[in-house]
Image (cartoon, rainbow, N blue to C red):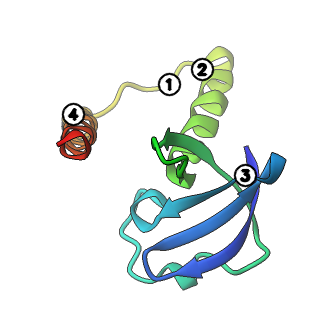
């Protein structure tokens, strides 16, 4: 979904969404690469595409620009795959992709478990 940044803080950016809702993009959900200073990426009033990754019991909405970008790339990749075959990934790259995906899933599970306790 589309949103507009209305506040940038050291740990993330607050985004206004349609319907008067607001959410926050944590600095870890900005990019695949390490983000040391979020001010280098965003400014107030900037329009961004975000994905809702969770809604807490208290109504706080967690957003991700990284996952929204991945989804768009996946859609575009699907279109390209229909047009031309893609070369297979290097075995090391495939292993790293799986490791990263597995690590992210474990971290999300740990965070959910920690929130419940």
Q: Which residue is mark 3?
A: 21
User: Considering the numbered disc 4 on the image, is that residue within a helix, a strand or a loop?
Assistant: helix
- Sequence order check: which comes first, mark 2 or mark 4? 2
Q: Nearer the viewer, mark 2 or mark 1?
A: 2
Tell me if 39 is positioned left or right of 92 in this view: right
- Sequence order check: which comes first, mark 4 or mark 1? 1
Q: Check disc 1: other Cα within 10 Å, few if <14, some if 14-19, many if 20+.
A: few
- The relative height of residue 88 versus residue 25 in the rendered view (above or below) is above
Q: Which residue is mark 4?
A: 102
Residue 47 percent location from the top left of the image: 78, 64
For residue 116, the mark is none
Tell me if 26 is positioned left or right of 105 in this view: right
User: Considering the numbered disc 3 on the image, is that residue within a helix, a strand or a loop?
Assistant: loop
Residue 95 percent location from the top left of the image: 19, 34
Q: Residue at x 47, y 60 (%)?
A: 31
CB contact under 8 Å: marks 2 and 3: no
User: Considering the numbered disc 1 on the image, is that residue within a helix, a strand or a loop?
Assistant: loop
Tell me if 40 is positioned left or right of 110 in this view: right
Q: Residue at x 26, y 32 (%)?
A: 94
From this viewpoint, which residue is outermost toward the front? 58
Residue 101 percent location from the top left of the image: 28, 36
Q: Which residue is mark 1?
A: 86
């Amino acid at each position: 979904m589309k949103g507009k940044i209305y506040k940038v803080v050291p740990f993330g950016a607050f985004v206004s969404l349609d319907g008067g809702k607001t959410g926050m993009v944590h600095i870890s959900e900005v990019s695949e690469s390490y983000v040391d200073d979020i001010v280098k990426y965003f400014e107030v009033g900037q329009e961004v595409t975000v994905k809702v990754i969770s809604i807490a019991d208290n109504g706080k909405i967690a957003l991700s620009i990284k996952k929204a970008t991945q989804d768009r790339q996946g859609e575009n990749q699907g279109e390209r795959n229909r047009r031309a075959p893609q070369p297979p990934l290097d075995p090391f790259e495939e292993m790293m992709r799986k490791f990263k995906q597995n690590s992210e899933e474990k971290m999300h599970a740990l965070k959910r478990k920690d929130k419940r306790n």
